[in-house]
Each structure stands twice: as C-alpha cells, then as structure tokens.
C-alpha cells in the first residue's frame, strides 16, 4: 500500500432516522472516523441491522450524513451539489451490490457500457472497454445475453466488469457474495480482488462472512454505531 494521501477519509460521521409516530430519532452512526489508503482492502463487519448499509450509503454518496465529512480523493461529498456529486461518483466510485443492479432489458455488454455512456465516453471506445472487461471476467462469449439468460454468478461478474470498465480508484462492495453459493462466491471474489489489485484500486467490503473479511488488509466492525478494530467475536 502507498503512503500517499488516503483515497477515502471519514470524519465524525453522524446519521439518524426518525421513528414512526414519534419525535424521537434513532442514532445509527455515532461519530464514525477512519481512512482507507490507496490500494487497501478494508472489510467492515457487523450484525444485521447494525448500520453497515447506512454507512455504505453515506460513504458512496448515495445518502447524506447528518454531520461529519466523507472525502473521496480529497473531495468532500457533503459539499457537492447533487449534479456535481453524481458526476464525481460516476468517475471515482464503483459499487458492487449483492443483487447486481443490472438492467433486465440490456445485454451484458450494454450493462457494462452504461456508465461509460453516461460519462460521455466515445461510443467506439466504450464498446471496446466494455468488451475487454467482459472478456476479463470470462464472459466474452456472453456479451449479447440478457440477465435472465445468465446464472447469478455470471450476473455478478457482469456487475464487476461494469465497475472495472470505469477504472474507479475506490470500490464499495455490499455483501457481493450474499446471493451466491459458496463455490461461485469464492470465484467471484477471487476475480474482484485480483482485478482491483492489478488496477491499484481500493475496496471497502461490507460483509458478514469472516472468511471473506480475513482476505482484506484490515477489518473494522460496526458496534453500537461506532467502528472498532477487529472481526466479530
């Protein structure tokens, strides 16, 4: 890992939600602070309902914290207007979801190419990059297939190819093997880790799987709204 500036810096993050029919609020994140170095693999663990998804939403710019700062590549996401944030997130942050988030009426190639199209990449270049990344994940021969024509493992590999095509320096993965069987999940994570290592990208992995977490450089667990070092007991 490099000793240069962190790719992600989180400072005193607070997030709460209102309770139905009450003026009280549920404090989910209670002053979270940590950094991620370039090329680092960080696992975040925690019990179900403990705030992992809320934290990931704030870190990726999909949700806003009540207070505190999230800086990606030195840019404070909380200070960006929505349109600027959307553009920055598309260029700088990749997200691999548990449920893939593929468009059913798009082919594998079109799903991978979509963020490139939205970023204004030249059509020919976008096609070439998308095809290259599909081949990288072993799906070069499936580029014209739709999600319902592929297995769950293949769909997750398409989702990984989509992230790789953008070349983002920071990738978030939210329980990426949660809907896969053990063998397929291991193969998918081997692919994701190897590809991001080649690209020099960092990954923040949210998982409940201790074996998967052990493959990362560092493990944090979310406990009572705070992050502490180490895996779940």
Image (spheres, grey):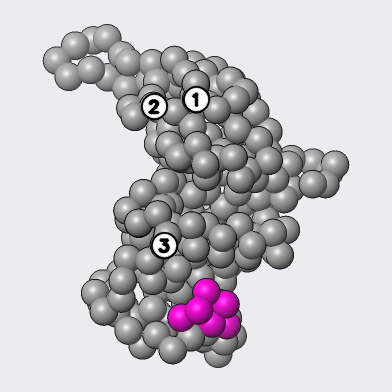
Structural distance between the alpha carbons of marks 2 and 1: 8 Å
Residue that lies at the very extreme toward the right in this rendered image = 3
SS at circle 3: helix
**Span shown in magenta:** 132-139
Q: Residues within 10 Å of mark 3 (few under 14, many from 20)?
A: some
Q: Is residue 21 left or right of residue 206?
A: left
Q: Which residue is mark 1?
A: 232
Q: Is residue 22 magenta?
A: no
Residue most extreme to the left: 21
Percent of width and height locating residue 122: 57, 83
Above/below status of 52 relative to 93: above
Residue 209: image x %, image y %?
45, 40
Cα distance in 3D space between marks 3 and 2: 24 Å
Circle 2 is placed at which residue position?
Answer: 47
Disc nearer the start of the sequence (3/2): 2
User: Pointer 2 and pointer 1: residues touching (CB < 8 Å)?
Assistant: yes
Figure quadrant of residue 218 = top right
- Is 224 above or below relative to 43? above
Which residue is denoted by mark 3 in the rendering? 184
The residues bearing labels 3 and 1 have C-alpha atoms spaced at a distance of 24 Å
Q: Earlier in the sequence, mark 3 or mark 1?
A: 3
Where on the picture, by quarter, is residue 62? top left
């Amino acid at each position: 890992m490099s000793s240069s500036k962190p790719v992600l810096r989180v400072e005193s993050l607070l997030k709460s939600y209102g309770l139905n029919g009450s003026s009280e609020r549920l404090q989910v994140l209670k002053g979270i602070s940590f950094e991620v170095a370039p090329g680092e693999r960080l696992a975040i663990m925690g019990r179900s309902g403990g705030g992992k998804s809320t934290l990931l939403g704030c870190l990726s710019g999909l949700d806003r914290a009540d207070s505190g700062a999230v800086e990606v590549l030195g840019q404070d996401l909380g200070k960006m207007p929505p349109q600027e944030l959307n553009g920055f997130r598309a260029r700088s942050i990749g997200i691999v979801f548990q449920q893939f988030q593929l468009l059913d009426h798009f082919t594998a190639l079109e799903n991978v190419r979509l963020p490139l199209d939205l970023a204004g990449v030249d059509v020919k270049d976008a096609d070439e990059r998308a095809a290259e990344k599909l081949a990288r994940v072993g799906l070069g021969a499936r580029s014209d297939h739709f999600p319902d024509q592929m297995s769950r493992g293949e769909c997750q590999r398409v989702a990984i190819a989509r992230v790789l095509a953008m070349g983002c320096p920071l990738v978030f993965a939210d329980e990426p093997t949660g809907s896969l069987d053990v063998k397929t999940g291991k193969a998918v994570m081997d692919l994701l880790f190897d590809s991001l290592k080649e690209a020099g990208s960092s990954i923040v992995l949210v998982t409940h799987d201790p074996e998967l977490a052990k493959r990362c450089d560092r493990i944090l667990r979310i406990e009572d709204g705070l992050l502490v070092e180490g895996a779940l007991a």
